[in-house]
Amino acid sequence: MGLFRKKLKQEHKIMRQAAQAKGNLLTEYHRATPECPNPEMWHMYDSMTAEYEVLEFLRTLVTTLKPKQIVETGAFLGKSTIWMAEGLRDNQYGQIVSCELDPVVFEEAKRNVQASDVAGWISLKNVSSLEMVVDGPIDILFSDSDPSVREEEVRHFLPQMNPHGIILMHDASSHKPVVRDAAKKMQAEGLISVVFLPTPRGLVIAQKLSK
Ligand SMILES: C[S@@+](CC[C@H](N)C(=O)[O-])C[C@H]1O[C@@H](n2cnc3c(N)ncnc32)[C@H](O)[C@@H]1O
């Protein structure tokens, strides 16, 4: 079988690894960057789910800003979706609409959301971010799908962004600068203003600029 074994899709491989870790926190192992020289100070559930400290930040951002509508792209196992929904539950206000493209991963995310006590705050869709349609203004956009589509998806949702709202783009470290460069490009075009948080995988905080 060896030679002909089908290559396991990265998302499915990490999904298995996450199941083996049984929810235990691991030391973050993404490589050091000039902006984040000690990533081992952070924690993670797995290498796809946002860093534990970033999950905490997302939940606190929700309780701080009291958003009516959060949009997330790339649910993976639903961890970030659930953590942000916990903020909505604490606020007793708002909703999160999230999407996951991969049908196998989507089913697992759906199971995790249904098993959580915040399922009522979440709408999870098996659709590409670029095809997802949401109604009304977006107060927080968390862009966390495939790095190659992040720029397109931010542009896709930008017309609906509340100008006082917050756009977050994950995986914006200088190690693989696709997302970082996309954020810089949109800033140079006068579309968004950006701040780069020096976390292990990098996090952009941006706001829509009115022309
Ligand atoms: C980095 S993971 C998301 C992690 C998750 N936000 C968390 O922190 O718990 C990226 C996910 O995006 C999904 N994905 C990739 N392209 C997508 C797209 N165009 N639309 C929606 N989901 C996508 C992948 O299947 C993968 O599960």
Image (cartoon, rainbow, N blue to C red):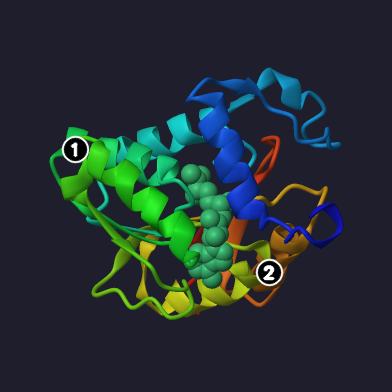
Q: Quadrant of the N terminus?
A: bottom right
Say what amino acid the circle numbered 2 marks. Answer: Ser
Query: Which residue is at 41% across, 58% downward?
Result: 106
Say what amino acid the circle numbered 1 marks. Answer: Arg
Q: Position of residue 184 (x, y in %)?
A: 71, 64
What count of labels does the image hold? 2
User: In what element is the residue under mark 2?
Assistant: helix
Query: Which residue is at 58% across, 61% downward?
Result: 193
Could you say which is closer to the camera, residue 205 or residue 44? 44
Q: Which mark is residue 148?
A: 2
Badge 2, how many Cα within 10 Å: few under 14, some, many 20+? few
Residue at the spot of label 1 = 89
Q: Position of residue 175 (x, y in %)?
A: 83, 48
Q: Which residue is outermost to the left?
A: 92
Residue 43 sits in which quadrant?
top right
- Ligand 1 neighbours mark 2 (CB distance < 8 Å): no
